[in-house]
Image (spheres, rainbow, N blue to C red):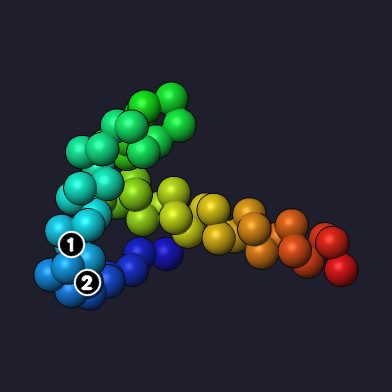
């Protein structure tokens, strides 16, 4: 699946900061691209959702 997302100027600025901020990321390894950041976010939400379903 390929998606196109629309971000506000503020959201774009925050994403740019996140990619630059090595201290924020475990192991100090930030995502390389905006696409990686979005994929990591989606993966985290899906993992959380599946865990929640398994806990019911």
Q: Earlier in the sequence, mark 1 or mark 2?
A: 2
Above or below, 27 relative to 35: above
Classify the position of the C terminus by image quarter: bottom right
Q: Which residue is mark 1?
A: 12
Q: CA distance from mark 1 to mark 2?
A: 6 Å
Number of other residues with Cα within 10 Å of mark 1, as a class: few under 14, some 14 to 19, many 20 or more: few
In the displayed structure, does residue 16 sit left or right of residue 39?
left
Rendered residue at 20%/38% (across/down): 20
Query: Residue 48 location, x and y as percent?
Result: 64, 58
The structure residue drawn at horizontal position 29% and vertical position 32%, both measured from the top left corner, is 22
Mark 2: which secondary structure? loop
- Image quarter hosting the N terminus: bottom left
Query: Residue 51 appears in which quarter of the rendering?
Result: bottom right
Q: Which mark is residue 7?
A: 2
- Residue 48 placement, left or right of 19: right
Q: Residue at x 33, y 32 (%)?
A: 23
Q: How many labels sit on residues? A: 2
**Coordinates of residue 45 in the picture (x, y in percent):** 55, 60
Label for residue 26?
Answer: none
Residue at 18% across, 62% down: 12
Residue 37 lies, with reference to residue 49, above or below; the image says above
Tell me whether the residue at label 1 lies in contact with that at label 2, contact meaning CB atoms closer than 8 angstroms. yes
Q: Residue furthest top?
A: 27
Answer above or below: position of 47 versus 4: above
The local secondary structure at tag 1 comes to helix
């Amino acid at each position: 699946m390929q998606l196109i997302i629309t971000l506000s100027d503020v959201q774009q600025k925050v994403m740019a900061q996140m990619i630059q901020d090595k201290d924020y990321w475990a192991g100090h390894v930030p995502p390389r691209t905006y696409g990686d950041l979005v994929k990591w976010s989606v993966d985290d939400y899906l993992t959380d959702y599946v865990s929640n379903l398994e806990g019911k």
